[in-house]
């Protein structure tokens, strides 16, 4: 049985991954932004542990985690939470930039730093669920893509730094996936949303678990997943 700490377990890809791990009896630690959300996650995933920490305020994560129980060791840290605000560079405010950089890049870096002792002890696996925007930036996606390009750099550097400690690092780059975030994106784009056109969250969960369950003699570094058609 593995021990996993997951961000973004409350919806979309995060929920699909958490459900798959719970079904096979693994131990789940779920990060929640506040106590109310932690209560909801505890009800959604009976038997799971919850940890409160707001990814929107990464500078306070160290203090928040120091006042709570944490696992002694980790088999994986799964970064799945994220936020998106579309807009042209000429219109995006510093608030929009900082919100996305904080939640999508700085918070994953800080959470990884804080949990590296447990990951090293367990020779664990850090998985970043990135985005196609982490490989290319289209119009109106500048701030989000910048945060995701940074997340790729974080993963690549971490892989080199922690390979000697037995820690594996994988980045998954999903294309458009049928999640609540995708509904928001379509609203911002002014487009009609049709979930059938996009990847199911359960498919991305399969991709994540494939990387996680790979035998220890190998490491999947980067995986791109695209909708068919």
Image: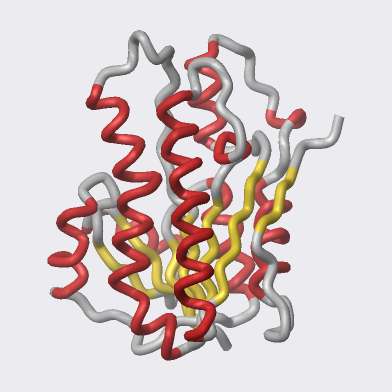
Q: Is residue 87 above or below residue 167?
A: above
Residue in the picture at 72% in, 40% down: 199
Q: Is residue 172 above or below residue 100?
A: below
Q: Residue furthest right?
A: 229
Residue in the picture at 54% in, 16% down: 139
Residue in the picture at 57% in, 50% down: 13
- Residue 146 spot, x, y in % from top left: 44, 34
Q: Is residue 75 above or below residue 51?
A: below
- Residue 142 spot, x, y in % from top left: 46, 24
**Rendered-image quadrant of the C terminus:** top right
Q: Nearer the viewer, residue 35 or 43?
A: 35
**Rendered-image quadrant of the N terminus:** bottom right
Left or right: 174 as drawn, with respect to 78? right
- Residue 174 spot, x, y in % from top left: 65, 44
Left or right: 34 as drawn, with respect to 97? left
Query: In which quarter of the view is residue 125 placed?
Result: bottom right
Query: In which quarter of the view is residue 191 placed?
Result: top right
The total number of labels drawn is 0
- Residue 66 spot, x, y in % from top left: 16, 74
Color style of the picture? secondary structure
Residue in the picture at 39% in, 66% down: 30
Left or right: 157 as drawn, with respect to 114? right
């Amino acid at each position: 049985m593995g021990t996993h700490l997951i961000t973004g377990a409350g919806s979309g890809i995060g929920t699909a991954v958490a459900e798959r791990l719970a079904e096979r009896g693994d131990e789940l630690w779920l990060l929640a932004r506040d106590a109310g959300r932690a209560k909801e996650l505890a009800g959604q995933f009976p038997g799971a542990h919850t940890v409160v920490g707001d990814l929107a305020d990464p500078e306070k994560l160290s203090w928040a985690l120091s006042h709570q129980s944490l696992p002694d060791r980790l088999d994986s840290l799964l970064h799945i939470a994220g936020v998106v605000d579309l807009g042209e560079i000429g219109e995006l405010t510093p608030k929009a930039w900082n919100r996305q950089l904080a939640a999508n890049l700085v918070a994953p870096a800080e959470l990884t730093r804080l949990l590296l002792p447990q990951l090293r002890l367990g020779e664990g696996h850090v998985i970043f669920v990135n985005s196609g925007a982490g490989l290319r930036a289209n119009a109106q996606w500048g701030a989000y893509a910048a945060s995701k390009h940074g997340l790729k750099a974080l993963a690549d550097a971490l892989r080199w730094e922690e390979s000697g400690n037995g820690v594996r690092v994988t980045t998954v780059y999903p294309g458009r996936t049928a999640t609540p975030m995708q509904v928001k994106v379509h609203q911002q784009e002014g487009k009609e949303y049709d979930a059938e056109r996009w990847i199911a969250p359960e498919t991305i969960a399969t991709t994540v678990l494939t990387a996680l369950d790979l035998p220890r003699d190998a490491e999947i570094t980067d995986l791109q997943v695209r909708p068919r058609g």
